[in-house]
Image: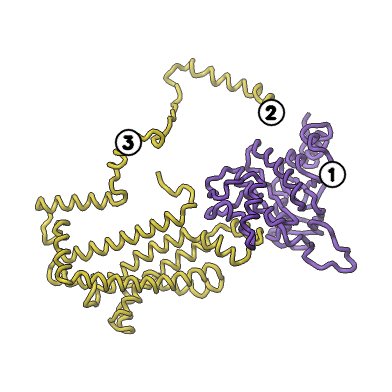
Chain colours: A purple, B yellow
Amino acid sequence: MSTTLATPTRPRRQAGALAEDVVRRFGDRTVLDGLDLAIADEELVVLLGPSGCGKSTLLRLLAGLDRPDGGRVEVPARRAVVFQADRMLPWQRVLRNVTLGLRGPDADRRAREALAEVGLSGREGAWPKELSGGEAQRVALARALVSEPELVLLDEPFAALDAITRLRMHDLVRALRVRHHAAMLLVTHDVDEAIALADRIVVMRDGRIGNEHLVELPAADREASGAREELRAALLHDLGLVHQS
Amino acid sequence: MTDVGLVAPPVREEPYRESHAEPPAEGTTASPRREVFLPGESGRRTALGVLRARLRWPLGIYTTPAVVLVLWEVLARAGVLSPAYAPAPTSLLGTAQRLWDQGVLGPDLAISLQRAGLGLALGLTVGIAAGVLGGLLRSGEYLFNGLVQIVNTIPLLAVLPLMIVWFGIDEFTKVLLISFGAGVPMYLNLFSAIRGVDQRLIEMARTTGAGRLRLVTRVLVPGALPGFLVGLRFSLAYSVLGLVAAETVNADQGLGFLITQGQTYLQTDQVFVGLAIYSILGLVADQFVRALERVLLRWRPGYEAA
C-alpha cells in the first residue's frame, strides 16, 4: 500500500519501500547523495556499511522521522521501527509497552500473542527494569510486529547484545519472517549478521548504494560453506577492508 | 565462534606467562589486594542483624528530629535552656493541651488548614493546567513562561501589602498568597519535566503509530511524573510558607495569629506550639508525597537507596 496515488504514467509499485534519488545534508556535509533503493514485498534487505556512512540517516528517512532534502521516499503507512536500544517506556509494564500503538478491544490479546511469538509469555506484567537486554529487545520486536506492519525497519537492533543472544535473535527473526509477511530493512555493520539474515545485501558507499549481493543460500550454507566465505570476502572488499587469509 | 576460541590462547600466552612469573620473584609483599564476596546480609538475616538495623535508624527519617527533641528536653530539664527562651518539648505538650481546652487551638488550626487547602487547590489547579499547556504546546510556553518567571522572582512577602490594598485583609488575600506559593513551583517543575521527557521515547512512540492522545497519556504524562512530584513537594512546602506569611501579618484567627499573640504577650511556649504545628504540617505533606512516589514511581530503577 503506497501513501500516494499511482499516476497513469507511473505504474503502481509493489515495492515495500522506495527511495529515489534521495539527498540529505547536515550543514555542508552531504550524507545521502542521490541514493536509490527499492525493497520488494516480503524482502529482507540488509544495509551494510561502516559507521557514520549514513545508514541510520536513510533508515530515519524511511521511518518518516526525518525529511529528505531532495528526491522522493515512498513507504507504506503501516511501518514499524526497532531501534538499537530497546526504547521501552520504563513506566509501563511489558504488555502496555507492546500495546502502545494499538487500538481496539483486542489490543491486549494481540499483544499477548506477539509476546508469545518472541518467547516472552508470562512476562507481560514485568517492568522493563526487570528484563535482560535480550528480553527487552525481544519486547521491542514484539512491539514492532504487533501492528502487522508492511515495512519493518531495524536499526542495528542486536548490536548491543552478546554474541550468543545475538545468534538466538537471528533465529527468532527467521522464525518471525515465516509468520509475518513484511518487507524488512536491517541496518548493521556486522557482516556475519548480514549473511545470516539477508535476502539481499546492499553496501553503502559515498552516500549511495554501492554493490548489491543477492543471497540465495539455504540456512545451513549461511553458517559454513564455500559460498558463504566467497560472499564474506566480497562484502569485506566492498567495505574497503582487505581480507587477510 | 569456535575458531576464535582456538586461535586466541597462543597469542595471549606470552604476556600472560610473563606477568605470572613476576610476582614470586618480587616476593609476597607485592601481592595484589584481593576482595572476597560472600552471600550478602539479605541472604542470612539473623535476629541480631535485624535488631541492629532497627536500632541504627529506629524511626527512619524521623530519627534525627527525635534525637534533637530528646537533646532539647534533656538540656531544658538540666536548666541549660531557660523556659522563657526554649521551653522543654514535654511542657509544650501541656501548653498545647491547655490551648486546646481553652478552645483556641482547635478553631485556629481548622481555619489555617482551610486556608492552606483552598490556596493549594487554587494554586495547584492553575499551576498544573498552565504547566501541562506550557509543556505540551509552544504557544503555551510563550503564553505562561515569561509571566511565571517574573512572578517567581518577586518575593511573596513583598506582594502582600499590595494584595491587601487590592483585595482587603479578608480571606481572599490569604488564599491568593498561598496559591501563588503553591502554583509557581508546580508550573516550573511540571513544565521542565514535560520538556525533559526522553526525545527517543517520543520518537519511538510516533513510529508505533500512537496518536497524539496516546503520546500524551502514555509517554509525556508518566514521563513527567517524577518532576511533577518534585513540584508537588515544593508546592506543599511553599503553601505552608505562604500560610505563615499571610497569617502573621494580619489575622484575628489561625495559627499565625496564635504565634503573633504569643509573641506579643511573651508567651514563648505558645509561639513554639504554633511552630511545632507548622512543622508537623510540613512533615505530613512530605510523607504524603513519599507515599505517592512509592505508588507512582514503582517503575523507576534503583529507586530505593541502599
Question: Tag on residue B49?
Answer: 3
For badge 1, the amino acid type reads Leu
Within 10 angstroms of label 1, few (less than 14), some, or many (20 or more) residues?
A: few
* Same chain shared by disc 2 and disc 1: no
Location of residue B111 (image quadrant): bottom left
Residue lying furthest right in this view?
A9
- For numbered disc 1, what is the local secondary structure? strand
Tally the numbered discs: 3
Measured from the top left, where is residue B260 in percent x and y?
Answer: 19, 71
- Mark 2, chain letter? B
x 78%, y 56%: residue: A33
Measure the C-alpha gap from mark 2 to mark 1: 28 Å
Measure the C-alpha gap from mark 3 to mark 1: 66 Å
- Mark 1, chain letter? A
Near-viewer residue (B46 or B149): B46
- For numbered disc 3, what is the local secondary structure? helix
For badge 2, the amino acid type reads Val
- Reply above or below: B66 against B34: below
* Same chain shared by disc 3 and disc 1: no
Near-viewer residue (B58 or B162): B58
Judge depth for marks 3 and 1 and give the one in front: 3
Within 10 angstroms of label 2, few (less than 14), some, or many (20 or more) residues?
A: few
Of pointers 2 and 3, the one earlier in the residue sequence:
2
For badge 3, the amino acid type reads Gly
Residue at numbered disc 1: A214
Measured from the top left, where is residue B53 in percent x and y?
Answer: 32, 40
Residue at numbered disc 2: B4
Measured from the top left, where is residue B276 in percent x and y?
Answer: 23, 62
